[in-house]
Amino acid sequence: MDSGSAAINVDFASLAKRIKAWGAELGFAKVGITGVDLREDEARLQEWLRQGRHGTMDYMQHHGTRRSRPQELQPGTVRVISTRMNYLPGGIDATAAWRTLGDGERAYISRYALGRDYHKLIRNRLQKLADRIATETGPFGCRAFTDSAPVLEKALARNAGLGWIGKHTLALDRDAGSWFFLGELYTDLPLPVDAPSSAHCGTCTRCIDVCPTQAITGPYQLDARRCISYLTIESREAIPEELRPLMGNRVFGCDDCQLVCPWNKFAQPTGEEDFAPRHGLDHAKLADLFAWTEAEFLKRTEGMPIRRAGFEGFSRNVAVALGNAPHTSEVMEALKSRAGDPSPLVREHVAWALAQQTAREGKA
């Protein structure tokens, strides 16, 4: 992104108002502005890393303090323009999600991953916002991010007034729930900052109580090593056997903590057609997904977040879900068809799933 100094004689208070209006025109549900002081959040992050709760995400340690000190990631940064974009498609509500979760023969894919990958879309919008700002200020220093670099985006969003960090550790807003993506523009423009959001979780513990693997170990405490989103997306290793039965049919991510959150009754559907479900993946059968070849996986997930798991990881996840599925001939045939899979990782999970199904058949 461009680097440089903002033009002098700019009315920054007026500019901040216009930035928010331009953001709305570009499809952002809300835009806020904050400074770069994240000392308290840095301390919490360092303690979380010290406890090893990040699992195999070693890159989080390798980034050092760049995640919590914006000026180290982008020199000259004095403000962060934080943006929020809704992603829940109309008609894809909690009822539909619970129906899929209750059907053991179907695959549950996190709602954010059913459509187009959000990274490029939001970065492009942020670029357009930066270009629009430049027409008012001239060249200025800025850089766009959306879950693509060491950025404490939830803390920045909270400080910018876009929502608080809930007990499930996700960003949450009274007027929008939690079904939204975040994006940031680091900038050297000395814009006026917004008031931070206050927390409104109260005594509610629904997200903690519902977590299938008890990954939310307490209010505002998440152990990624037990989180289904981490296990099915970030981890490239074997899923711990004791956690497999708890995963149900969740093959990419998990939304349970959002589905039970009372604030999500205020969530607004997205107007972005790119976030609509593709290839019928909001109700796909596990056996059908397990029959995909790698070429089919790459074709059907092109431009989608699911690609992040990779074919091997996705197959591992589906194998576990098939092991948890009701005992049917279709499930057994699907598993047996890949009992000799070239991947040792997939073979091991298929063997486990077949053992689960065989035991289930015996009990029947």
Image (cartoon, grey):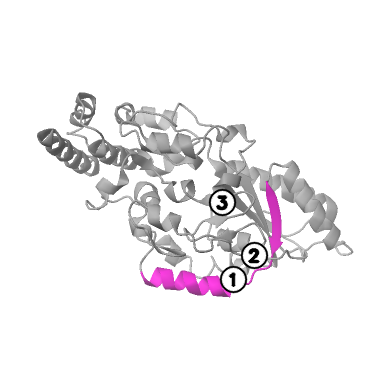
* Residue at image location 61% in from the left, 62% down from the top: 158
In three-dimensional space, the C-alpha distance between marks 2 and 1, rounded to whole angstroms, equals: 9 Å
Residue that numbered label 2 is attached to: 159
187 in magenta: no
Callouts 2 and 3 close, C-beta under 8 Å: no
In this picture, which residue range is highlighted in magenta?
A: 29-51
Instruction: Give the camera-side residue of 180 and 313.
Output: 180
Callouts 1 and 3 close, C-beta under 8 Å: no
Sequence-earlier tag: 1 or 3:
1
Mark 2, other Cα within 10 Å: few <14 / some 14–19 / many ≥20:
many
Q: Where is residue 359 in the image (x, y as percent from the top left)?
A: 12, 38
36 in magenta: yes
- At mark 3, the secondary structure is helix
Sequence-earlier tag: 2 or 1:
1
Residue that numbered label 1 is attached to: 38
The image quadrant of residue 25 is top right
Mark 2 residue type: Asn
Q: Where is residue 328 in the image (x, y as percent from the top left)?
A: 21, 27
The image quadrant of residue 209 is bottom left
Sequence-earlier tag: 2 or 3:
2
Residue that numbered label 3 is attached to: 263
* Residue at image location 61% in from the left, 38% down from the top: 269
Callouts 2 and 1 close, C-beta under 8 Å: yes
Mark 3, other Cα within 10 Å: few <14 / some 14–19 / many ≥20:
some
Q: Is residue 277 left or right of residue 104?
A: right
Q: Position of residue 44 (x, y in %)?
A: 48, 72
